[in-house]
Image (cartoon, helix red, strand yellow):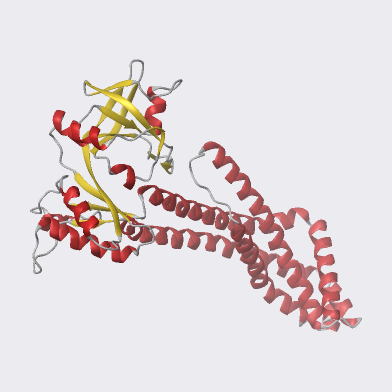
Amino acid sequence: MKRFFSELVESVRIAGEQLNAHKTRAFLTMLGVIIGVLAVTLMGTAMNGIDKGVNDSLDVVGTDVFYVARYPWNAGRDEWEKMRNRPYIRDNESIKLNKIIAESEDSNLFRGAPAVYWYPPIDIKSPDHTASGITTLGTDENFEFVNKASVEEGRFFSQMEAASGRGVVILGYDVAEALFPYESAIGKTVRAKGRQLEVIGVFSRMGSFFGLMSFDNYAIVPLKWLRKHYSWNWHTEIRVKMAEGANKDEARYELMGAMRRVHGQVAEEEDNFAVNSTDSIEDNLAPVKNGLAIAGFGITGLSLFVGAIGIMNITFVSVKERTREIGTRRALGARRSSILLQFLTEAVSVCLVGGFIGLGIAFGLKMVVDKAYPNFPFVFSFNLVIIAMIASIIVGILSGIIPAFIASRLDPATALRHE
């Protein structure tokens, strides 16, 4: 073992001398590895970023919240045709549902709240500014308990305000910033479709989905106020929050049973509603992410393969150029394993240096992307560094093993006669 480490140190020294003596050739040789490692690292970084972005976005939507709606989120056209005769979800169904939850001992459900969307998105105006394309929904006082965002400033509307349909509104963070950029929005008056609303609360910042869709661009009004002034609506859902520590599958089954009671369905009838959750989003995104990963790593693997061919070719050239040196070393007693280790170490060294350069370029590009697109979660992890280095070592071994083996099998006398 001691002899092996001694030979390895000597091989590393010789490899360093060769790289220094042929800098241009070495750099051109390792270009394939640099590009390959750069591609692998960037692809892995992007995939990590996509995973983080999706997980963060699903967390904002609420992994512990169910969305009772007329249709499932992943319904296709054929399913839609089949389900189009389903009854619309009524906002007063949340009252019946909450009563069932309250009467259930050790329920897996905590609270339900209606969410009636005001379509299309509207403009909300303050005396000096306008916020456009605002998603607005009407609900009751229970929405405070099922919504992921908390009220950062001010308060949520009370049961009395919800029951009376008072003209109050809670703004999303971005809406409040757009309407009142230099002052607090609390107590101010805004107008929506010509109707006056008093701002009583502002939600905390929730962020966006890859910088494309903001989770802070919405406003909440009492449902009764919305019904009083605007009757057109075609999308109502009930958001139901799980009890803390409840099992998600058990909570789903309990909710489905409770909704069947609300709808007065008998045992043999098929559900005339859908219980949606973030699970369906994850299921739909999984094939897309897997497809991107397979395609991306297939392409990057091809670039590493091309780099390996280049290193194998230059290693063959190096063996040819140093045939007399190999003969001299063999004549002086060097073992075949020493010759093999020497050329294998040189090939791996080229790949490792190329790998480090590729990692450095990848990290630099990450910094540029972070500056240009701060909302994109570009995640550069330590695991990617390990994977890139392992890939570099494997490419070096695979590309150098054949030339190194041929070098170690050269006959000393023949090698010494080589011109």
Observer-nearest residue: 164 or 306?
164
Observer-nearest residue: 269 or 42?
269
Drawn side of residue 368 relative to residue 287, left or right: right
Q: Is residue 75 visible?
A: no
Instruction: Locate residue 6: give its quadrant.
Output: bottom right
Q: Position of residue 84 (x, y in %)?
A: 10, 53
Instruction: Locate residue 255: give its quadrant.
Output: bottom left
Q: Is residue 6 above or below residue 185?
A: below
Q: Is residue 400 above or below residue 145?
A: below
Q: Residue at x 48, y 63 (%)?
A: 298
Q: Quadrant of the C terminus?
A: bottom right
Q: Residue at x 24, y 39 (%)?
A: 139
Q: Residue at x 18, y 43 (%)?
A: 235
Q: Is residue 130 visible?
A: yes
Q: Is residue 285 above or below residue 169?
A: below
Marks counted in the figure total: 0
Residue farthest toward the top in the current orientation of the protein: 127
Q: Position of residue 169 (x, y in %)?
A: 29, 30
Observer-nearest residue: 193 or 406?
193
Q: Residue at x 79, y 59 (%)?
A: 19
Q: Is residue 330 above or below residue 385?
A: below
Instruction: Locate residue 389: give its quadrant.
Output: bottom right
Drawn side of residue 347 relative to residue 383, left or right: right
Observer-nearest residue: 368 or 221?
221
Q: Position of residue 1 (x, y in %)?
A: 82, 82
Drawn side of residue 405 relative to residue 324, left or right: left
Q: Position of residue 414 (x, y in %)?
A: 83, 81
